[in-house]
Amino acid sequence: MIPYGRQSIAPEDIEAVVAVLRSDFLTQGPAVPAFEQGLCDYTGAPHAVALNSGTSALHVACMALDVQEGDVVWTVPNTFVASANCARYCGAEVDFVDVEADTGNLCVEVLREKLETAERAGRLPKVVIPVHFAGRPCAMPQIHALGERYGFRIIEDASHALGATLGGERIGNAPWADVTVLSFHPVKMITSAEGGAVLTRDAALAERMSALRTHGIVKGSEQLAEGGWCYAQLELGYNYRLSDVHAALGLSQLQRLDGFLERRRELARRYGELLADLPVKCPPPSEACSWHLYRIGVDAAKRKHIYEALRERGYGVQVHYIPVHLQPYYRALGFKSGDFPVAERFYAEGLSIPLFPDLTDGEQAQFIQALVGPAGPEH
Ligand SMILES: *Cc1c(COP(=O)(O)O)cnc(C)c1O
């Protein structure tokens, strides 16, 4: 089966993991700080805190921005459920902002109108979570300007977007978000098997997220003065620590990221050419996008047939995303079909096709041949 996405593991990645297994520390050793420093060096972000998943990263980001019961958090329907669930973990209400039809990213015009309405109703969001769908950066300067105007904070869900750039800056190194969230799940840009991170320019936020990762515990000079054994739990945190085994894999993968990006961008350009004569909608070309996904739009009436025909031929195509507000859990909170029509259409027509660094030119060309039959006009 050729999947829509897959990790690339090289001998040096395996060596890095084995070296940790042979060392004194499997967790809370030197690999996690080294990985965090690597993420700072790569992105330009002043602070990075590694966590055991992207979902944990979203959760501590919300907690550090004081999201709590009585607050409202907005995200997009075209995302993985974790982008919304993080606010629910904090007891906040979730609402959604519809997306752009061509990119699947948060639509700034819709956001602007929704903010005007929310201001009149006295129900402005505390935090907005834009998602860089497929690795294509959202219009962050505009979203940030609205944040200044309406007083909300921004967590950018960059789970797809490590290595993507906006205005020449790498995602994670910009004043447009309070916190940038990364995921290192195997299909993402780099992997630590499971893992995630938060990046921020704000030292106090970084310190708080770092404490929340380990029960809310700090060991500052005050504690050390009392005795070397002493620590203080300041608030209710979790065990969201990444292990050194995972961090070593993540750091090794980070050295390979530029190669991954180059190959993904090359494959994306080639898809644009190979798909030009087929009745499918291609994503807008972009060299700034990290191309976590290559999502095409097909005739919604034929989508299931195309999906099944390709699966039968050994292509693990996938659909990104079932709109979050249509999940049974969110429907039970009052959302329904028709609430966010652009995201719903984006879902109905969407198909993510194979794109990962180790996909060969030959495999890509063969995939196009397999797609021509079921996606062609005669079916
Ligand atoms: C993968 C992903 C997450 C969650 O990351 P995990 O590491 O699997 O917890 C969150 N948001 C988006 C958009 C993702 O794609």
Image (tube, rainbow, N blue to C red):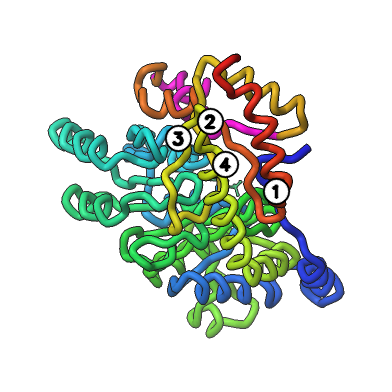
**Label ID, residue 348:** none
Give the structural element (helix, strand or loop) at label 3: loop
CA gap, disc 2 and disc 3: 25 Å
Give the structural element (helix, strand or loop) at label 4: helix
Q: Identify the element where label 1 is drawn.
A: loop
Is 225 magenta? The answer is: no
How many numbered badges does the structure rendering display?
A: 4
Residue kind at label 4, given as amino acid type: Leu
Mark positioned earlier in the residue sequence (2 or 3): 3
State the image coordinates of residue 166 (x, y, percent, origin top left): 37, 61
Q: Which residue is mark 4?
A: 274
Secondary structure beneath label 2: loop
- The part of the chain drawn in magenta is 316-334
**Residue 266 falls in image quadrant:** bottom right
Q: Nearer the viewer, residue 116 or 352?
A: 352
Where is mark 3, residue-wise? Answer: 78
Q: Residues within 10 Å of mark 3 (few under 14, many from 20)?
A: many
**CA–CA distance between discs 4 and 3?**
26 Å
| Residue 284 screen position, x and y as percent | 42, 44
